[in-house]
Image (cartoon, rainbow, N blue to C red):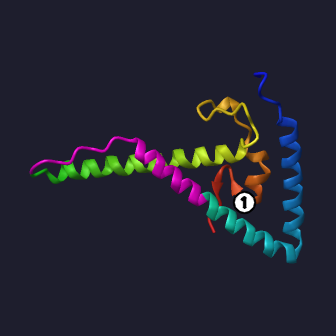
Amino acid sequence: MQGSQRDTSGQDASQDAEILALVARLEREPGAAAVLARARKHGQEIVRAMVEETVRALSALEPRPAPSRGAAAIAVLAGEARTRARAAQERKELAVELVYGAIVNADNPDWDPFDPATSRTADASGVLRLLNTDAGTPTKR
């Protein structure tokens, strides 16, 4: 580890454990469960907005395809549309991975989004549990 970075993994684990315990306790209390549900919904909306913004940023980095000139065959146009749809799906998947990776690794100075070995595990993330997510993807509601 570099000298300018501090090891916060023990602190992170402690904070995550506290969040996980708090969420478990709130889920069992009827009055608190409703508040927790509203907070989760709001948090999930924020995360969705972050994913959408990341998709837009990733899209802006890609070169724009040249417009088709002249009469193009339907098969060619359909193939181009499938390619664009596939690229859009891949951008969204990458955006979700980046956003959830950033959430899980917010206090991890060694995290490198291009090196999975530097990431903390999503299943131990108190924040993801608070958002009621499963393995880094928002729970469908």
In terms of secondary structure, what is the magenta stretch mainly?
Answer: helix
| Amino acid beneath label 1 | Leu
Foreground of the two, 49 or 13: 49
Q: In terms of image quadrants, where is residue 42?
A: bottom right
Residue 107 vertical placement versus 114 (above, below): below
Does residue 13 appear left or right of residue 77 in this picture? Answer: right
Q: Is residue 53 above or below residue 119?
A: below
Mark 1 secondary-structure assignment = loop
Q: Which residues are magenta?
A: 48-70
Which residue extends farthest top? Answer: 2
In the image shown, does 87 or 7 lie closer to the viewer? 7
**Quarter of the figure with residue 139:** bottom right
Q: Residue at x 9, y 50 (%)?
A: 70
Percent of width and height locating residue 111: 69, 34
- Residue 36 position in % (x across, y down): 79, 69
Question: Residue placed at 88% from the left, 69% from the top?
Answer: 28
Going by the image, does 78 lie left or right of 90? left
Q: Residue 33's spot in the image, x, y percent?
A: 82, 72
Residue with the mark numbered 1: 131
Q: Residue at x 85, y 54 (%)?
A: 19
Q: Is residue 60 magenta?
A: yes
